[in-house]
Image (cartoon, rainbow, N blue to C red):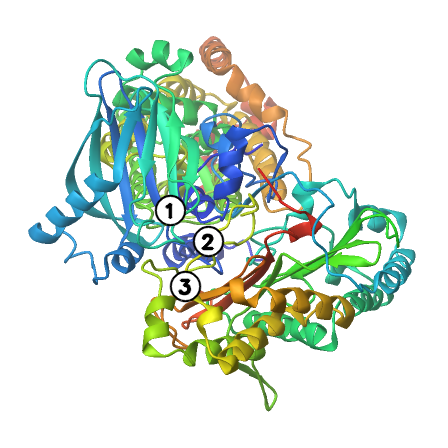
Amino acid sequence: MTPLLVTPALRRSFAASLAVAALISVSACSSDTTTSSSPSASSSASSSQRTGGGPPGGKGAPGGAMQTFTAVDLDTDGANASNANTSDVVTATNAFLATLDDATKAKVVYAFTDNASRQTWSNYPSAQVPRKGVALSTLSDTSKAAALAVVKTMLSAQGYAQVQTIQQADDWLKANSTSGNSSFGSDVDYFIAVYGTPSTTDPFMVQFGGHHLARNYTYKGTTASITPDFTGTEPKTFTVGNTTVEPLKEKAGTLFAAFDSLSADQDAQAKLSAKVDDILMGPSVDSGKFPTTEGVAVSSLSADQKKLVLAAIAAWVNDAAPGQAASMLKTYESQLDQTRIAYASSKTVDGEDTYLRIDGPRVWIELVNTRSQSTPNVHYHGVWRDKTDDYGSTNPSA
Amino acid sequence: MSRHPSSWRRGVSLLLACATLLLLGTASTASAHPLSTSAVLLDVGTTSVSATVELPLDELSVARDQVLTASTVIEASTLAELCTYVQGHLSASDASGRTWSTVVTNGRVEPVDGVDNLVLDATLTPASGPVGDFVLHDDVIVDQLLSHRVFVSGRYGSTGSYTTLAMLSWQTQSVPVASATPASTSAAPADEGFVAAVRLGIHHIATGSDHLLFLIMLLLPAPLVAAGRRWQARPDTGLGGAARSGVRVVHVVTAFAVGHSCTLVLGALGWVALPSRLVESGIALSVLVSAVHAVRPLVRRGEVLIAGGFGLLHGVAFAAILGGLDLSRTSLVTTLLGFNLGIELTQLLVVALVMPSLLLLSRTPAYPAVRIGVATLGAVLAAGWLAQRAGLVGVNPLEPVAPLVVDHPVALAVGLAVCALALTGLQRVRATRPTPRRSLPRWAAPERERLTTDTCR
């Protein structure tokens, strides 16, 4: 009964979306568009044409859509990592699906060809950007354990610990957020979805993620694609009981170590002229177009510095199960001399617009300090993408 | 619950206090990751294109590498620099690739979603001839701050809602814009800003059965006076009583107007925002409270209090409608005035249609039945809305009933007038023949009679 209205607030929050590529492609081609939406606040580029008046008591619904996801073309020819533990993941996924009743299963399983849904991941909480699949909180204890077993199988021990610490940060926010978002929490804010039929021969994908986390693992035979992979945390450090938790300690620590090693001359080459206050290759930026390569060439760095860069890359890649991680890392290592590293504004840990980037022929890693209303300090957004393997696709294109 | 008047009064005061607190104490809902974005709002005309450019100061500061506050940004030298900067990064070009002229003026600071924005007016003019299809280029802020986003929207004619055209970013800094749409070119001349806003105001209240019902519930007891917890007919009959009833109506309508105007302005400026569900539920509650008040006075002069207090809430809803227009800031005042005028006009029309009938009816023995019947209907409808809007029920079973009222306002008003005249006529006829009063059913006993019986209790 409430008509759709685009209030300034809605416009603004819509504007806050990372939907640039998506929006452009709406006019460029006729791909499917799905919008993160709730019934009262669904919004897309076209809904702003709607005007007021109408049914009894009809007024606007502020808030709502933060992102629009538009399907881009995805093939299955991505330059996947080899040595994937596909059969283990198939077993774990089937075991998980077997615990579900038909209604729940229907919510978990999507067609592998549902590209817009496969691209639905975000740094936002699920309250702002609803995820595909089902929330852990809606599953029975048995199903939830089976779902987490799938995630555990996809990842390394380090990768699974990363998931847990990011979820802990969300629990911390639930208890401490100044913006009072009760939708935070390790149970309610994290979702699992399966695309296609788990198979050791045909492509399928398992998606697990939520606030500050996106694991998009696409399997094809014994190979796997591990990107796009988003990890972030707010706050950067917090305590649970007497333990200090720093979810991105390894990723940020290794990356800062690489940039800290730069000489004045190298530093000058690494510094971008422009500024950046959030990741550029974020959610729904799936056009396949990456920024122009800039920064200091890793080939010009010392052997020790190269090790630091490789360690920083490894901190992201090693989240995946060991076989495919080793395969992927070997590829990136072989391309190290064609890789550059760059930073913007500042490279201090708590710098206002600290932005660090690794940019290779395939590897793309960004880490940035960004702001929110939930806590007073900056926090991390980080993304790892593969220029020829995101979603297991050689070249996603709008 | 005690039915003692003072506890009723306390209840209503509490309710009003709560509503006011909610209004004052809540800012817009916080998101976990706000991103300040620019906006370019295009008004595509026939000889030039005007653009309202909104630049959030926080992002502008980062891009310009200088701290820009609401006061420093409009210092003459800074503003001149920024106008030049925007002029150099905002342009249009036509099909032949010729770049139009860009003139940027009128810098001011306005809040958009709680963030101060530098707002500028830009005029884009073709080198020669009328406005044809063009490409808008904009990399203001984005040229320095790569992660910045620019939201571009446009409209034709000087009013109506903007249509999203594109989100510009480091990936794309231009968007094609059509010179006009066939529909808009024919509609545009008749649709001047102020008139359109008045029309929107009329349309909104005339089709918003909850606003109408709220008003009618408040008018129901206007011809009466409260004595303790009962309504009574005015002891002063004739023109004097009618005049005093009229004054009461003026108070109610004025209180409502003042209430909703306050929050309409605050809401339109973005200073007050409430979750729509809360507002919608509150409006349903306002109808319910006013309906109960029409049955039994909740508090002395309660209809004025209710009209004013809940008027605040209705204003928030009106502001949401205005927000739907996605106003360019320059026309905000005009639109606000027009919209409010539309609302008041419609309100007065409703009063003019309904009040004479109510005045007549209030002097017939049937008025308590009419009043209680209408109020009960209102209360039931309001309870249905409240349950639905508060999420207690999925579908409101009464939903089809409300539009019946809205769709046939004239028929209803005429019907009411006919009833009023008929009953008045009937009373006159009876007055000429002595009728034993006790034979009337108790509920139909004239209210004036109650005045005397009340004193005996």
Q: Nearer the viewer, residue A146 or B150?
A: B150
Residue to which mark 3 is pinned: A295
Alpha carbons under labels 1 and 3: distance apart: 61 Å
- Viewer-nearest of discs 3 and 2: 3
Q: Is residue B233 visible?
A: no
Q: Quarter of the image for the C terminus of chain A: give it.
A: top right
Q: Residue at x 67, y 42 (%)?
A: A74
- Please, is residue A111 above or below residue B69 in the view? above
Splitting the image into 4 quarters, where does residue A343 fall?
bottom left
Return the residue at label 1.
Answer: B309
Distance (Cα) linking label 3 and label 2: 62 Å
Q: Which mark is residue B359?
A: none
Which amino acid type corresponds to the residue marked 2 in the rendered image?
Leu
Quadrant containing the N terminus of chain A in the rendered view = top right
Within 10 Å of the Cα at label 2, are there few (<14), some (14-19), or many (20+) other Cα atoms? some
Helix, strand or loop at label 3? It is loop
Out of B18 and A328, give the one closest to the viewer: A328
Cβ atoms at labels 1 and 2 below 8 Å apart: yes
Left or right, residue B75 beside residue A266: left
> Same chain, marks 1 and 3?
no
Q: Amino acid at mark 3?
A: Gly
Q: Position of residue B250 (x, y in %)?
A: 29, 31
Residue B15 has which mark?
A: 2
In the rendered image, residues at marks 3 and 2 fall on the same chain: no
